Image (cartoon, rainbow, N blue to C red):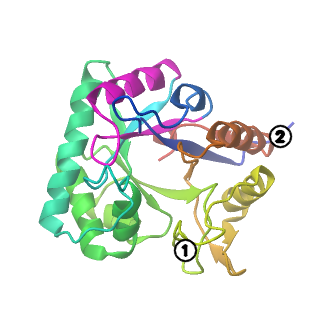
Amino acid sequence: MNIIMKKVDLNSDIGESFGIYKIGLDEEIVKYITSANIACGWHAGDPITMEKTIEISKKSGVKIGAHPGFMDLMGFGRRDMSITKHELKAYIKYQLGALMALSRNSGEKVQHLKPHGSMYNMASKDKDLSQAIAEAVYEVDKAIVLVGLANSELIEAGKKIGLKVANEVFADRAYNRDGTLVYRSVEGSIIENLELAIERTIEMVKKGRVKSITGEYIDIEADTICVHGDNPKAVEFAKNIRKNLEYEGIEVVNMSEFI
């Protein structure tokens, strides 16, 4: 019998459809994840999609979180913006507030907040932007968990202001030697091989390390694992990664149970 050695959360970015345009297999992936990052209408999503995503998450016992991004539908929030700290705080509060209002009618509470795309990557390296996000969350609801790239400026900003934080690792993305994510435009940035994704995920959770795209091992802390919802293999990845984590004696639960 396996002994439970660690608890870990499994999350996915969902609710990213917009109007008549459908992205992802949200109804399927919620069967295997424990936390859902719901797009808040700027990089993707809309009020109706948000409501629907809250409901399907609730039915599967999945905790919900806000997934705010830049107002960039055409670029899916993956293009950098020149932005001030004051502006970013307002953007975070606006999108978080929208999800909180829509979730209240369902009796659901927003568990966490995870920035999207370029907002996430920029804040991972920029102290001012990471501080802006942490302050915005803290000023709205101190109980919300701030999710950020493991060992990044965003995690440090959350800790400094007094928020609970969740170090995030990625099952389907490659890493640079400094712990940042490889840009999607670079060959090999997206991991499409299921067995490799499982192997890397287990190593990150159990051994606290991951091999970078250039071959060096880097230390990493894993509280929550992301499988991108817009990955064509997202459901297959989530299902099999969870199965293998549990086989290894790792308990997969939503982050609020251990953070």
Q: Residue at x 33, y 52 (%)?
A: 74
Crowd tier of the residue under label 2, counting other residues whose Cα lies within 10 Å: few below 14, some 14–19, many 20 or above: few
Q: In which quadrant is the N terminus drawn?
A: top right
Q: Left of 129 or right of it: where is 213?
A: right
Residue 64 bears which disc, if any?
A: none
Tell me the amino acid under the disc marked 1. Gly
Q: Which residue is mark 1?
A: 179
Q: Residue at x 27, y 34 (%)?
A: 99
- Residue lying farthest right? 1
The secondary structure type at the circle numbered 2 is loop
Tell whether position 90 is magenta: no
Residue contact between numbered discs 1 and 2, judged by CB atoms under 8 Å: no
Where is residue 216? Give x, y as percent. Answer: 70, 81
Q: Nearer the viewer, residue 77 or 163?
A: 77
Residue 135 falls in image quadrant? bottom left
Q: Residue at x 60, y 80 (%)?
A: 177
Residue 54 falls in image quadrant? top left
Residues at marks 1 and 2, CA–CA distance in whole angstroms: 31 Å
The secondary structure type at the circle numbered 1 is loop
Q: Exactly how many numbered labels are in the figure? A: 2
Where is residue 256? Give x, y as percent. Answer: 46, 40
Above-or-below relation of 187 to 42:
below
Q: Which residue is mark 2?
A: 2
Tell whether position 52 is magenta: yes
Where is residue 64? Give x, y as percent. Answer: 41, 34
Tell me the amino acid under the disc marked 2. Asn
Where is residue 133? Give x, y as percent. Answer: 26, 59
Q: Earlier in the sequence, mark 1 or mark 2?
A: 2
The magenta stretch spans which residues? 33-60
